[in-house]
Amino acid sequence: MKFAGIVGRLFAVGFVIMSPAIASLGLSSSLHAKAPVAPPVAPVPSGAPLGTAGNAGMQQADALAAAALAAPSATADAALPPAPKPEINLWQLANDGGPLMYPIYAMSIFVVCYAFERAFGMRRRRLLPPGLVSELGELSKRSGGVDPRAAYRACQRYPSTAATVLKAVLLKIGRPFAELELTLKEANEREAARLYKNVRPMELAISIAPLLGLLGTVQGMIMAFFVTANADLHVNKAEQLAQGIYVALVTTFAGLCVAIPAAMLAHYFEGKIQTFFRELDELVLGLLPQWERYEGKLRVSSNSLAGETETPPTEPPVARQPAPVGRS
């Protein structure tokens, strides 16, 4: 009993002594539970001076702020309009091409004018009228072949390049067949030269226009390098040189724009002329055998072929041989 009383008194004394410590521990735990958790601070080196922890925190905050500012803002980018793309003003660029642009303009006008002239001058009815071909076909179906007078009058009714060649051959009827072929060839060459006469300016533009453009480009580049070499120090020479070069190239571009269509047009008209003369040769060479029977028997002229009668030209009179003088 005495031992139990002693133990009870000791426990009571210890509880009284430990109660302030237990109360302080409970208060501190409750304070720790209610206070917000601070972010971890980087450890301070042992040899760092006072206030290094605060400087490290400031540096970390500055780094986060810089990263936030450097990040692109989707809202700001969406609100900004797209930057306008630079465009070339061709009219202003052509005016800045230099004085050699004017002869290139003149060459382009010549090409257009001669192209329209050849397009109208080389129509089918001006070269080989269908009426002339059909009438000659009807004449060839008659007995005895094509009458030279009827063929000549048909050529007069349908004036054309084919009629001119055919009339030249008709005026040689009665001559040897080789002479008729030679006449056909010469007449074709004369008419071909007349048809090619207005195609040659386009061929000239094919050669001259690119040369004028190249000359203008060389002149423009010389001026661009000269201006760049003598520019002030504060001027952007690379930009100025690039601008001078692309302006100088305008003349070459303009020259090619004239020469390429001119080459296409000239090739088209040359092919049309060659096709026409092939058809004309086939037509006339098909008629020549029908006039071979007049070889050495007729002498014709434009007046006799243009007569109103359908009878063929008369044969030349045969010279009479003098009678032999009898012996006495």
Image (cartoon, rainbow, N blue to C red):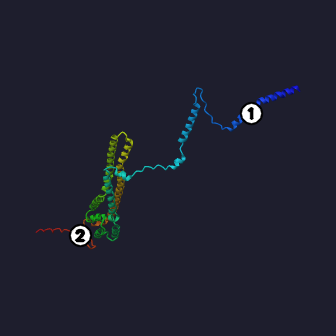
Are there few (<14), some (14-19), or many (20+) residues within 10 Å of tag 1? few
Q: Tag 2: Cα neighbours inside 10 Å, few (<14), some, or many (≥20)?
A: few
- The picture quadrant where one finds residue 16 is top right
Q: In which quarter of the image is residue 137?
A: bottom left
Q: Which of 289 and 302 is in front in this view?
A: 302
Q: Earlier in the sequence, mark 1 or mark 2?
A: 1
In the image, residue 324 lies at what x, y percent?
Answer: 15, 68
The numbered dot on residue 154 is none
Q: In this view, does 251 lie to the left or right of 41?
A: left
| Residue kind at label 2, given as amino acid type | Asn
Label 1 sits on residue = 23
Q: Of discs 1 and 2, which sits in the foreground?
A: 1
Give residue 303's mark: 2
Q: With respect to residue 81, does 149 lie above or below? A: below
Residue placed most toward the observer, 18 or 283 = 18
Q: What element carries label 1?
A: helix
